[in-house]
Image (cartoon, coloured by chain):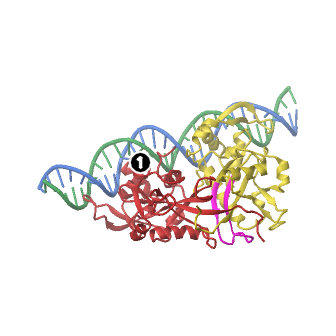
Chain colours: A red, B yellow, C blue, D green
Amino acid sequence: MNYPHSSRILLALDCIVFGFDGEDLKLLLIKRNFEPEQGKWSLMGGFLETDEDLDVATNRILYDLTGLKDIYFEEIKTFGKVNRDPVERTISICFFALINIHAHDQDLAKAQNAYWIDLKNRPNLIFDHNEMVDLALERLRYKAALHPIGFELLPEKFTIPQLQKLYESIYQTQMDRRNFSRKILSTSLLIDTGEKDENSSTKKAILYRLDKEKYQNQINAFHYFMADFKR
Amino acid sequence: MNYPHSSRILLALDCIVFGFDGEDLKLLLIKRNFEPEQGKWSLMGGFLETDEDLDVATNRILYDLTGLKDIYFEEIKTFGKVNRDPVERTISICFFALINIHAHDQDLAKAQNAYWIDLKNRPNLIFDHNEMVDLALERLRYKAALHPIGFELLPEKFTIPQLQKLYESIYQTQMDRRNFSRKILSTSLLIDTGEKDENSSTKKAILYRLDKEKYQNQINAFHYFMADFKR
DNA sequence: ATGTAATGTGTCAGAATAACACATTTAAAA
DNA sequence: TTTTAAATGTGTTATTCTGACACATTACAT
């Protein structure tokens, strides 16, 4: 039995990969060395295979780009204008991913012709990919204001000032050091490793790691990290 | 030019329609009088047409069920397990909609064999539709705790006790009358119509209407209506 | 040794919240 | 007509949370 329906359509997945280098929030973008739109910039994407679960396809696309498994990602929205892809009718499920910028496989990125681009310098992208990035940024800001997902962008061990710089770059704003520290520590999600950050030049900051068990339990809890972010 | 790719797939849309009758939160479900799974319960759904924008398809499906336009809806998640639909490989974009239960076209609902079912008595649904409802309820609870979307389930004019009953039925909890009232009024989203609810038996409550302009501006603002809802 | 920049900890006034008391309205009962 | 009871509207207060700011500590540079 089949459905009496002929509108079978290509299903694509497009991914906004966020990274943080300690100073700025960055995007992993593709300088296309293939058609269509060769030479232009786009998001990393791929097609769903007929015999492939959707979440498997998402992980495959992320793995082929970064060499990482178990990446944090979130579905954002499905884009489905009739003419969004001039080549052929294609529906695209858009999602964003957060990775530790230092942990991914740089050879794979090079093979895909992918580059880390500062959000502030982002080039024009093909199709509706600009809109996708706008939405992803909005969603990241929304989610990170309420839930402790920022850690996904940092190394295993990190300092509170590093975390603050991350938040400041996400929201393009300045925050009070002391209040931020108090709020973060009050979540009880951070464990003092006993080590200190040897890179910082003056007083070395305490290196924390995430309490992963508490993190899993609290991932949906409200924390209200960004009280100022009320738009 | 075409993509060198053969995995063209059926794309479905499945919708969780919420309604509120003044006492309980309800779902509009289909008692299937067509194949597959005839006789069983399912969500309202449909297929995306080849020449149809995705958002147009969503509105079409909602209109065919309710006779309403400009319905509030939100995309939740795309379901894409290989065997989720035993008939044929089908990807389904799942979304929820909020409607005024008294405003929809009952003849259309009857034509679709749709019935309002109390959430507490919901039957087993076909395919992965149970999972979809669980997720929709979770998302509704999440969203309504922070944003003033509850109004979408009420008539044009409503009282604060009605609104409170709605929230209590969404979260299956009791709330303090006085604190709830204060919190709602502090949003400045409600306009006193000067009228009173003639149905209530004792002291008639003030009928308010939504300040739609402020509502549109504040739809993304955080309000934190459910301080207890911290899971 | 001393200065400086970044980090860690503490303080306090004002705002927001949760718990609770009291007054008002209206229909039904006495 | 008066009384009663249930639901609604408004007010109060102790507690907690937040935002703004001061001060102490660390480690490198001079």
Q: Is residue A10 above or below residue B17?
A: below
State the image quarter where residue A199 is shown: bottom left
Q: Which quadrant of the figure contains the C terminus of chain B?
A: bottom right
Residue A225 image offset from top left, x and y in percent: 47, 52
As drawn, is B39 to the left or to the right of A26? right
As drawn, is A26 to the left or to the right of A51? left
**Could you tell me which chain the residue with mark 1 belongs to?**
A
- The segment highlighted magenta reads B75-97
Residue A217 image offset from top left, x and y in percent: 54, 65
Q: In this view of the protein, which residue sits in the foreground, A205 or C13? A: A205
Residue at image location 37% in from the left, 59% down from the top: A21
Q: Which quadrant of the figure contains the N terminus of chain B?
A: bottom right
Magenta-drawn stretch contains A187: no
Magenta-drawn stretch contains B93: yes
Q: Is residue D1 above or below residue B229?
A: above
Residue C23 image offset from top left, x and y in percent: 68, 32
Among all residues in the image, which is located at the extreme front? B1
Q: Name the residue under label 1.
A: A172
Q: How many labels does the image show?
A: 1
Residue at image location 76% in from the left, 52% down from the top: B24
Find numbered disc 1 in the image and state the secondary structure of the residue it sits on: loop
Q: In this view of the protein, which residue sits in the foreground, A115 or B193? A: A115
Q: Residue type at mark 1? A: Gln
Q: In this view of the protein, which residue sits in the foreground, A98 or A203? A: A98
Crowd class of label 1 (few under 14; some 14 to 19; many from 20; radius 10 Å): few
As drawn, is B205 to the left or to the right of A231? right
Residue D25 image offset from top left, x and y in percent: 26, 57
